[in-house]
């Protein structure tokens, strides 16, 4: 069967439309060359090979302070781990790769003059109080047809079985599937992908040379504003923080962070 008979006119029009969109959005634009692979779940967080570490510990502190008048003020940056949706692979890092890994156009807000001792309590509080709410949200999303949480659970279970197949020979790394048929059936035999869970929220490294009473910029992704304010008012009583204390930290959005970092550091 030739491509002419296999590819329908409708299918070819979709392909053409996608190719046109790629050109219109300049998805082939090269930001730099990634020096290694960075994964969400196949390397532990935090670690040099984890894309969450890349984003929050390396990329965000660079990208969010470009042309920023507050660049010289120590800060702590917090976002949710769901900001990252896919791995970054070694090699050319294009605009398409940037939007695949971090597609969300979230803003970053900040509260100035939060003492380090107070700011350092926000991230642990976010993660401590988020697990029950996250489970409830995941159940609701599953009911609406969103499969992300179940997919992650499957990956985690597959990762647990990795130990059982470490000594298997002639198997390549990949997804492991099984069916209900007797024997091997259509089972896919692989060495399972390793899987490491990640926290709900991630934060940048503590700024160097600060003491507990050093005033910092507490920077956070916009949609957790109310939660951050509630936590700040629960861990201290000297200041009553409100939305009036919150400002836009930078016009740079979350989906641009990795590209700006690549331009600065991967060339």
Image (cartoon, helix red, strand yellow):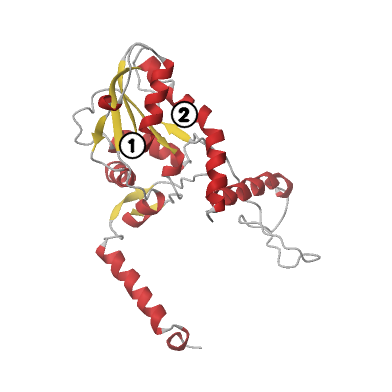
Image mark count: 2
- Residue, disc 2: 126
Can you give x and y, in whole percent of width and height, for residue 110 in the image?
A: 29, 29
Secondary structure beneath dot 1 equals helix
Q: Is residue 242 left or right of residue 122?
A: left
Q: Work out whether mark 1 precedes mark 2 in sequence or the reverse, and give the earlier one.
A: 2
Farthest-out residue, right:
182
- Residue 47 numbered mark, or none: none
- Residue, disc 1: 222
Above or below — where is 207 with respect to 192?
Answer: above
Category of crowding for the residue at label 1, using alpha-carbon neighbours closer than 10 angstroms: few (below 14), some (14–19), many (at least 20)? some
**Could you say which quadrant of the image residue 66 lies in?**
top left
Which residue is pictured at 49% across the width and 46% down the height?
39
Above or below — where is 61 with respect to 260?
Answer: above
Q: Is residue 1 left or right of residue 168?
A: left
Secondary structure beneath dot 2 equals helix
Viewer-closest of 145 and 260: 145
Which residue is pictured at 61% across the width and 54% down the height?
173
Viewer-closest of 239 and 57: 239
């Amino acid at each position: 069967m030739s491509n002419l008979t296999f590819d329908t006119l409708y299918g070819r029009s979709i392909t053409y439309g996608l190719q046109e969109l790629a050109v219109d959005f300049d998805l082939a634009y090269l930001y730099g060359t990634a020096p290694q692979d960075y994964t969400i779940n196949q390397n532990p967080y935090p670690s040099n090979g984890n894309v969450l570490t890349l984003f929050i510990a390396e990329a965000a502190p660079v990208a969010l302070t470009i042309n920023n008048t507050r660049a010289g003020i120590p800060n702590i940056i917090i976002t949710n781990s769901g900001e990252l949706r896919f791995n970054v692979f070694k090699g050319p890092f294009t605009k398409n790769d940037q939007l695949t890994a971090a597609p969300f156009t979230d803003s970053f807000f900040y509260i100035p003059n939060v003492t380090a001792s107070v700011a350092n309590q926000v991230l642990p509080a976010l993660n401590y109080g988020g697990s029950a709410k996250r489970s409830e949200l995941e159940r609701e999303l599953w009911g609406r047809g969103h499969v992300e949480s179940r997919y992650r659970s499957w990956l985690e279970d597959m990762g647990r079985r990795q130990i059982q197949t470490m000594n298997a020979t002639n198997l390549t790394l990949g997804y492991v599937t099984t069916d209900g048929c007797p024997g091997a059936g259509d089972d896919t035999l692989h060495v399972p992908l390793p899987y490491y869970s990640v926290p709900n929220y991630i934060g940048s490294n503590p700024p160097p040379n600060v003491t507990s009473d050093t005033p910092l910029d507490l920077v956070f992704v916009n949609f957790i504003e109310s939660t951050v304010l509630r936590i700040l008012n629960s861990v201290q009583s000297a200041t009553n923080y409100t939305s009036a204390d919150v400002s836009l930290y930078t016009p740079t959005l979350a989906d641009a962070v990795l590209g700006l970092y690549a331009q600065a550091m991967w060339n």
